[in-house]
Image (cartoon, grey):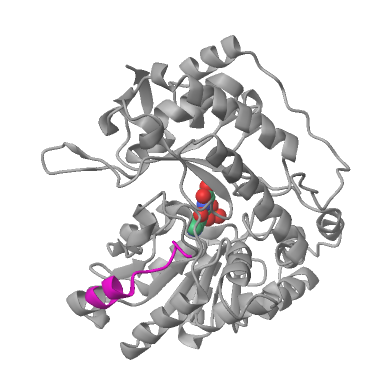
Amino acid sequence: MNTIIEPFRIKMTEPIRLTTREQRIERLEKARYNVFYLDAEDCIIDLLTDSGTGAMSSNQWAALMLGDESYAGSRSWKKFEKTVKSITGFKHIFPTHQGRAAEGILAQALLKKGDVVPNNSHFDTTRANIEFVGANAVDLLCQECYRTQESLPFKGNMDLKKLEICIRDNGSQRIPFAMITITNNTGGGQPVSLENIKAVKEILNKHDIPLIIDACRFAENAFFIREREPSYENMPLLDIAGEIFSFADAATMSCKKDGLVNIGGFLACNDDRWAEKFRNLLILREGFPTYGGLAGRDLEAIAVGLMEALEYDYQVYRHATVRYMGKKLESLQIPFVKPVGGHAVFLDALAFLPHISTDRYPGIGLVNSLYIEGGIRSVELGSVMFGKTDKNGREIPAPLELVRLAFPRRVYTQSHFDYVLEVIEEVWKNRKDIRGYRISYQPEFLRHFTCHFVPE
Ligand code: F0G
């Protein structure tokens, strides 16, 4: 069937302001050609991120009203703790205001200068938190991920050989923990198999290195495992999630993704000594351990949202939407990362715009054209976000020039995505006219958020 039945009805609507092409050209110029500076109201379809942009269910809104705002030991905390424990099995749970707060506490508590943290791919905030305390964040992603046109089931897997070499070269004493990000956001939203998680854990066990899961999109990853990994095809997603976490010693979580809320996160672990350190930092930075960085009502909404994300029908719908986009793009022969990820479609900007060299940022050319053509806001994951500079100040391009169209959860319907496809098709037809950009201003760190561009 071609029609996606969204497994919900819409009770409340939020208006979308329609703009003309002329207005969008003007807004983009004012925004220095960086879509992060645009007013959200000027975006017809906002696919900048799937983080905190989802719609809550009626059950979550109802749960908000049950929020117990007591400073210590609230009823809402008990519900939150019970739910997170029932999914992850971890002994100690610490609520944080979002994922990067959990990462910050983890890094400050366990890392020191010169330490090394392997991951399949670090998200930029994870990397920044690790580097901020002087440690090195190392990406050990499998080679297949760099072959964007090859459709393989688990392109988020960690490369086991690279992991062994990393441990051999650095020594286990310098690796206080390793991480796995599920799904692997920066590598195309690709899933990690349970087989890979198990194998990583076995290698780490040999060297007494704990494993920490970046669990932002754990439910989407569990769905991929159920669909693609032998012997999991009939398993409830809750059980698959339980198995994933059983191989981990701790987890960081941004509930803004698979917690189906607009704000929230947590850090969880088994080790009592780690817990002691986390608790002390949590009190210092976020709040008392039974609310962390959150209101009681947020804890309530997360407790409901985490379980809703593990509902099979919800995940079927979620993945159907992303796949629908992939199928249509394929039929139009528009280049994108294959297979589609769990939370986003990643267009291959280099293949889309081969006439723009990497130092003129094809990703930005594509992002800005999608905005001008149809008011769609996307994000570049290429040389602007991940490019480095060598000793002579010359830019080293990123391995891939991608443009991410991230799907907010339960927000847009199939007709919105049909519109997005029409816009992409129009941009594709006129791709030869798209120009590159130069950077006219950039800050020292995380330049993609605030740099200014000038069209060529
Ligand atoms: N880890 C991963 C894999 C993420 O994708 C993100 C956020 C974080 C950690 C940090 O969580 O935002 O709650 O502090 N990703 C968002 C994105 C921002 O657009 O992909 P946070």
Q: Quadrant of residue 21?
A: top right
Image point 23% across, 68% down: which residue?
A: 114
Image point 56% across, 31% down: which residue?
A: 377
- In this view of the protein, which residue sits in the foreground, 394 or 285? 394
Number of labels in the image equals 0
Extreme residue in the top direction: 22
- In this view of the protein, which residue sits in the foreground, 277 or 378? 378
Magenta stretch encompasses residue 158: yes
> Considering only vertical position in the picture, is 383 above or below 362?
below
Which quarter of the figure is the C terminus placed in? Answer: top left
The percent coordinates of residue 152 (x first, y second) are 46, 61
Q: Which residues are magenta?
A: 154-165
- In this view of the protein, which residue sits in the foreground, 168 or 230? 230
Image point 50% across, 19% down: which residue?
A: 28
Extreme residue in the left direction: 392
Q: Quadrant of residue 180?
A: bottom left
Task: Specify whether 129 is left or right of 262.
Answer: left
Magenta stretch encompasses residue 406: no
Q: Is residue 295 visible?
A: no
The percent coordinates of residue 84 (x first, y second) are 67, 74
Task: Specify whether 77 is left or right of 289.
Answer: right
The percent coordinates of residue 14 (x first, y second) are 79, 34
Image point 66% across, 17% down: which residue?
A: 19
> Considering only vertical position in the picture, is 24 above or below 85?
above
Q: Quadrant of residue 332?
A: top right
Q: Is residue 184 visible?
A: yes
The percent coordinates of residue 372 (x first, y second) are 54, 19
> Considering only vertical position in the picture, is 179 above or below 146?
below
